[in-house]
Each structure stands twice: as structure tokens, then as C-alpha cells.
Image: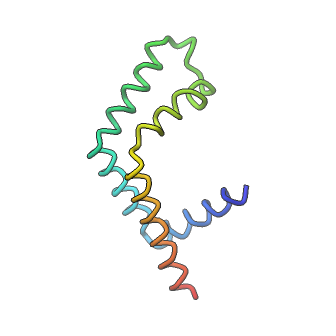
Amino acid sequence: FMDMIRAEDLEKELRKSGKYLILAEILRIRLEEYGVQEKWREIFRQALEEGSGKVSLTSLQQHWLPLAREAVPESVKQELISQILNCSLNLKNLII
């Protein structure tokens, strides 16, 4: 629960500073470079091919979303985390 609150606070800080859109664009570019969006399309295409009776919000969250997350390379996750932490530290230094 505390991690969620911290994440929300961090998101607010990033949005106020203007860094949020920059980070979102970096993430979009990296995902495109690694072909992740195409992998996601394939994962969700499979879900739809299984039939609408089998695809539900629950199945998307429990089965398909983890597969989509796994498609994101670890290097992309680490780069984004590093960027967020750097932004967060810079913002905190400005506040202090």
C-alpha cells in the first residue's frame, strides 16, 4: 500500500516538473525499438482468437497482462527506473 502511495506521489512530482511526458516518450521509443508493441499485439490477438466468451477483464489481468509485461526487455525496465529515480532525486534536491 505504501509503495502505491509513493508511486502516486512520484507520478504527481513528475507531472508537475514536466518530466512525465519525456519519460513516457522515452518508454514509447524503447518499446518500439525492441518490437514490444508488436509482441503485445500478438498476445492480445491470441486472447481475442480464443473467443469473446473466454476473454474477460479477469483473464486479461491474470493471464494476458503478465505475458505482455514479460515481453518488455529487462534493459528497458532498468533504463526507465533509472530515469525515474534520477528525476525524483533532482526534484527532491530542488525542494530541499
Residue closest to the far bottom: 96
Using the image, determine if residue 64 lies above or below residue 69: above
Color scheme of the displayed model: rainbow
Residue closest to the far left: 33
Residue closest to the far front: 74
Using the image, determine if residue 36 lies above or below residue 46: below
Q: Position of residue 65 (x, y in %)?
A: 52, 33
Using the image, determine if residue 32 lies above or below residue 57: below
Q: Residue at x 47, y 60 (%)?
A: 81
- The quadrant the C terminus occupies is bottom right
Q: Residue at x 51, y 28 (%)?
A: 64
Q: Residue at x 73, y 55 (%)?
A: 1
Using the image, determine if residue 73 lies above or below residue 59: below
Q: Quadrant of residue 82?
A: bottom left
Q: Quadrant of residue 18?
A: bottom left
Please give left or right for residue 34 compared with residue 68 in the image: left
